[in-house]
Image (tube, rainbow, N blue to C red):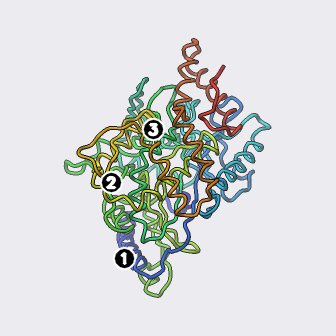
Amino acid sequence: MGQSIEKTSFTPADFKRFEEKLHHCLDALDSLLARPGFGQGNASIGAELELYLVDGEGGPLLRNLEVQAQAGDPRLTLELNRYNLEFNLSPVSAMGQPFSAIEKQMLEIMTNLQALLSEEGGGVIPIGILTTLGPHHFGEAVMTDEPRYQVLAEAIRKSRADAFGINIDGPDPIHLVHGDVTLEGACTSFQLHYRTDPARFGRLWNAIQLITPLMVGVAANSPLLLGHRLWHETRVPLFRQSIDDPAAVNDGWNKPARVSFGHGWLRGNALELFREMVQLYKPLMPLVSAEDPRAVVAGGGIPSLEELCLHDRTIWSWNRPIFDPEGDAHLRIEMRALPAGPTPLDMAANAALFIGLAEGLADQLEPLLSALPFAYAEENFYRAAKDGLQAQLLWPNARQNGLHEQSLASVLSKLLPTAEEGFASIGVEGEECRKWLKIIEHRLSTGVNGASWQLAQFTQLMSAGINRKEVCRQLLAAYQARSVANTPVSQWADIE
């Protein structure tokens, strides 16, 4: 939702024109994908890192506009809530040492922002959900003063009840009655973008869908909300419940959720996913451009497909197809399920595992997909979000007779050689491969990721008789110190 807009109110005629234009965009994209050579090129990796701004006490710092201006870095963009900023990393080639380059970029921006805020005792923290958030850190007063967010918030309000419930189970179940989209802004992510040749899009998409539960479990870093111990990756239920109305029905059937794991294995090419978006979901922001995309394609050009790209950004599937018309126009897969943090080192390792596994599995998928119906892959996703590294999943085997549960950690351990094969296939250097998989191996052997570390420290501090608010403050201070040191979370010491 980084696009600046001026129009903030819309008529039924606006929606009608936008809906028609979406179908023109689909026609243009269909023709473009049939054009020889479109989107071909070397694989590249990009990322978006969402960060919390915090004050000297570890609480949310509502100054993203000022900090963005002070930093003067065009790669920094605003987020929904005033205590968040997003850093858009410069894309890197998948060949050579891509994940080291990604880590370096994250370290540099975090160091720069830390220096900006250090004089007043504040800083930046990569964490899925800030432990020091309180009920007063949500609502209209914390929303970034940008028209696009106001329009988005109003559109979501109209699509559901005036007030809605947030209900998440766990050791300390939580129930909130809230009517504001800023709850979604509590969820900060590390989103990967992977450019792929259109001819390989379907195989890579299905591989990424298959392994996303594994990635959510191994990277989990969001176990606490308002002092409640919930899911290991609480972002998953919180994001969905803050956007979608589970009670919303049309003539007796449930509307498709705008936050979802998807609707099935991909049977064709990327166009199938864009058609699905247009045909299943009502538009929220009907901004119509003057471009005739079909005429642009017919003339040999590259259309911007502004309406389709905007509509895409109002559907928050955990993996998302991206059409990018800029420069060397291409398709990407955006992987949106990973949380921010705990360190640049950990996030780069997560990125490496995600890409390596996807590439390693892409050409051996067919017998696996028939052995795991999509509904079970979706179940795996929610199990991994709930239980993290301790999750029990259904994992496919080409020679199976029936489905069998396995621990997430054991599945990943067996797949590490597959990730190595994936690295080799796209030209990642051997030393680069070993560096990042070693971090994952240690995480698996110790059973410690961001979520499990936070939960262990929270429980330890609570047992000492400290009140819950102070426990959250002390936990965040210890987390921040270790995150700045950039040592892998699996090596973090307990709070003394």
Q: Amino acid at mark 3?
A: Ala
Tell me the element at label 2. helix
Q: Amino acid at mark 2?
A: Leu
The residue tagged 2 is: 368
Q: Earlier in the sequence, mark 2 or mark 1?
A: 1
Q: Earlier in the sequence, mark 3 or mark 1?
A: 1
Say which residue appears at 31% left-offset and 59% top-offset.
280
> Disc 3 versus disc 2: distance between alpha carbons?
19 Å
Residues under numbered marks 2 and 1 in contact, where contact means CB atoms less than 8 Å apart: no
Tell me the element at label 3. helix
Residues under numbered marks 3 and 2 in contact, where contact means CB atoms less than 8 Å apart: no
Q: Amino acid at mark 1?
A: Asp
Say which residue appears at 66% left-offset and 53% top-offset.
100
In this view of the protein, which residue sits in the foreground, 199 or 64?
199
> Disc 2 versus disc 1: distance between alpha carbons?
33 Å
The residue tagged 3 is: 409
Vertical arrangement, residue 235 with respect to residue 7, above or below: above
Tell me the element at label 1. helix
Q: Earlier in the sequence, mark 3 or mark 2?
A: 2
Residue farthest to the right, as pictured: 119
> Disc 3 versus disc 1: distance between alpha carbons?
44 Å
The residue tagged 1 is: 27
Q: Quarter-wise, where is residue 207 in the image? A: bottom left
Residue 70 percent across, percent down from the top left: 75, 51
Vertical arrangement, residue 33 with respect to residue 222, above or below: below
Neighbours of disc 2 within 10 Å: few (<14), some (14-19), many (20+): some
172 left or right of 349 in image:
left
Neighbours of disc 1 within 10 Å: few (<14), some (14-19), many (20+): some
